[in-house]
Image: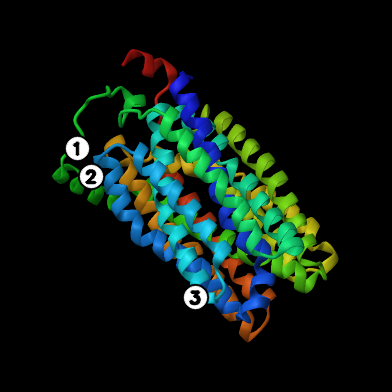
Amino acid sequence: MTRPALIALLLLFALNLLNYLDRYILPGAQPLIQAEFGATDEQMGALTTALFIAYMCTAPLTGWLGDKFSRKPLIVAGATLWSLATLFTFFVHDYWSLYFRHALVGVGEATFGIFAPAVLSDFFPARERNRILSFFYLAIPVGAALGYLVGGQLGARFGWRVPFFVGAVPGLVIAGLYLIFASEPAPGESEGKLAGAPRPTTAEMVRNFRGLFGNAGFLCATLGMAMMVFTLGGISAWMPTFLHRFAGMGVGKAGTILGAITVVDGLAGTALGGWLAQRWLRRDHRALYLLSAWSMIVTLPLAGMVFFGPPRWSVAALFVAEFFLFLNTGPLNAAIVNSVSAGVRSSAIALELFLIHLLGDTFSPQIIGAISGRTDLRVGLGVTLVTLILSGVLLFFGARFAPRLESKAEQNER
């Protein structure tokens, strides 16, 4: 691993961690916010919808920019925007201002979320990407856990606005460090392209982008992830409230328990999933798809026990369910970036993010909230069991189209 690659990996990891910390402060403090504004369950779910609608509208443009121009200033700009939007939340005093703020966070995330995997893919070859992306995505459970903890604990003690202030400042600091110390790899550098090679023309980019819709490996992995994201987004947004309502926990305790489960399962599941997939890849090029598919299927009965089992079992069942769900984090993201060429990678990730949020967590919190308002939260969360099944089916089918990866000997011969 070269020094520029290591610096980029560490700084992007830190930004990813802060990205998810900022996103999950809201669920951690959600009962407090809902009580102050008198918002319904559906309105609270609509906040996440606002974030991802802004995300989806921004993603196609930023994906094109990333394939056409340098990604470093775009990463810095996005991280700065979401951090400032999080800081703005400290001054929010009505529901619609909070709604607007959440949409701004989505605009900022639509830059970083697209460019970080593309930059890392240009630093590291295909056979190493599962390992590198598994490390990169360890930031998700850590950041989410910290968001739950900061939102629940600081919100309960000092009011729900304080956690947003605490979460904003580090993002501005890391964005500055990335601007100063990070370098920009050439697109396709890990695949033999040299710095200074011409960027693709607009006509080439359009042709490559159209080709994504005929790429079965890319589409199956993306749609499988979309169904998983529907489940994970709905659970993430509503689980603190679920534990508060059905397990009799206080807001602070629910956030602490969920944060602890998320960080332990996220670290253990993501690390183990990356390790298992890396070993499996030595024997079967379909491993990234197959491991991800099995993680969905095993999670299914455990999630059902969380939602519909006795309340005394909910925490233990949630702990095991999240562990298996996190197994796919690195492998599934690696499957997606490996399925496309370097010249269209930023645009492909932009399309992937557009689809997984359009079909996944943009509407799942609001849908669950709407069903909860008409029945109860258990029934609303039960919808996510259907999407777990769909995810597993899509990924098993997609394994047929998994690309064969070069061995180290073949890379050396190039």
Q: Which residue is mark 1?
A: 200
Number of numbered discs visible in the structure rendering: 3
Specify the amino acid type for callout 1.
Pro
Pointer 2 with pointer 1, Cβ within 8 A: yes
- Residue under the point 26% across and 39% down: 69
Q: Disc 2 designates what residue?
A: 208
Residue type at the position of mark 3:
Trp
Judged from the image, the secondary structure of the residue bearing numbered disc 1 is: loop
Q: Which of the 4 image quadrants contains residue 115?
A: top left
Front of the two marks 2 and 1: 1
Q: Is residue 333 above or below residue 358?
A: above
Which label belongs to residue 96? Answer: 3
| Quarter of the rendering occupied by the C terminus | top left
Question: Which of these two is toward me, 3 or 134?
Answer: 3
For the point 65% across and 36% down, the residue is 272
Name the spot of residue 59 as percent of width and height, x first: 35, 54
Please indicate whether residue 20 sits to the left or right of residue 177 in the image: right
Where residue 251 sits: x, y (%)?
A: 76, 66
Question: Going from the N terminus, do you reach mark 2 or mark 1 first?
Answer: 1
Residue at position x 66%, y 77% in the image: 36
